[in-house]
Amino acid sequence: MIKRLLPWLFVLVAGPALAAGAGPVLLQSGANISDQASLQRGAGLYFQYCASCHSLQHMRYSRLARDLGLTEEQVMTRLNHTGAKFGDTIRASMPAGVGDDAVGGEDWFGKAPPDLSLVARARNDGPNWIYTYLLSFYPDPSRPSGWNNTVFPNASMPHVLWERQGIQTLRPAEEHDEDHGHPQPPTFDLQTPGTRSAEEYKQDARDIAAFLEYVGEPAALERERYGVWVLLYLLLFTGVAWLLKHEYWKDVH
Ligand code: HEC
């Protein structure tokens, strides 16, 4: 019996480990969807730098306002640049096909930008993947966009945040630190500083990762809020039950 189960056990235990080993080495983002200020900053960056190309078709402006603690006016003036209505889903402001040639041409270097509603769930270890992706762009003249990325090799997305991060070059593979055979993330050297310090740029990436994690599962926010009340209720109820027990047994002893 055990013998027959062993291969399955191996798949269960080693499968995820092997799968994790096969992908890029991801950094820990520290993204936290209960941090509302972080979600608000992430949304601001998203609409400034990403929403021209990427839609969020499962998310409505009105829901964003409610979940992120923003007013209708804040969302409609600061985030929505497409003229969409408050109750509309979020479409890209310059979808593929109508882009201006100077920016990328017909279809952004051959690929249509995908909808990002579910990307944090679709990608393995999504928030960390997005975070590491945003930290891993480097110039590559052989690519049509002029950029490449170690997390998503040959991606046809340019480094849209380069002015904030600056320009970093990739060290040759043999110079990457090896830690006793454990794969290490690639290392970069900042050549031209950006408008943000290294730490501030990491915070940008963390905020965007948190925002996209929230967009992928907005109900998670509510669950956390209810969760606190459920725990408080249970605690209170335990107290009451304990008092009751005392009351009942008082006369028996
Ligand atoms: C100029 C248009 C453009 C802008 C602006 C842009 N992207 Fe992209 N993005 C793309 C394209 C095109 C792809 C598809 C790359 C491919 O498949 O080769 C992509 C892919 C992605 C992916 C991977 C999706 C997947 O799972 O395959 C993520 C995540 C992403 N973009 C996030 C962002 C974020 C975050 C921003 C803003 C900071 C942003 N993008 C801004 C064009 C853009």
Image (cartoon, rainbow, N blue to C red):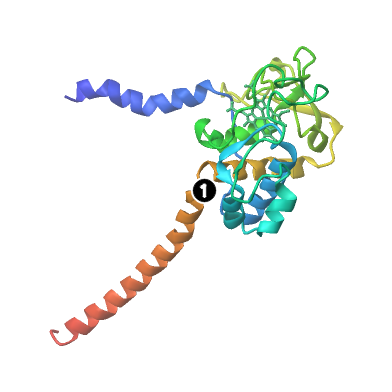
Tell me the residue at 66%/55% (across/down): 37
Total numbered labels:
1
- How far from the left and from the top, in percent, is residue 49? 74, 38
- How far from the left and from the top, in percent, is residue 57? 57, 38
Q: Is residue 51 above or below residue 44?
A: above
| Number of other residues with Cα within 10 Å of mark 1, as a class: few under 14, some 14 to 19, many 20 or more | some
Tell me the residue at 80%/38% (across/down): 164
- How far from the left and from the top, in percent, is residue 85? 64, 48
Looking at the image, can residue 35 be seen? no
Q: Nearer the viewer, residue 48 or 207?
A: 48
- Most extreme residue toward the top is 142
Q: Quadrant of the C terminus?
A: bottom left
Label 1 sits on a secondary structure element that is: loop
Q: Amino acid at mark 1?
A: Pro
Q: Quadrant of the N terminus?
A: top left
Q: Nearer the viewer, residue 135 or 209?
A: 209
Looking at the image, can residue 221 be seen? yes
Q: Is residue 79 left or right of residue 181?
A: right
Q: Quadrant of ligand 1?
A: top right
Tell me the residue at 66%/42% (across/down): 208
Q: Nearer the viewer, residue 169 or 55?
A: 55
- Most extreme residue toward the right is 192
Q: Nearer the viewer, residue 20 or 76?
A: 76
Q: Is residue 174 above or below residue 161?
A: above
- How far from the left and from the top, in percent, is residue 214? 56, 46
Check disc 1 and report the residue beneath it: 218
Q: Is residue 241 left or right of residue 25?
A: left
Tell me the residue at 48%/50% (across/down): 220
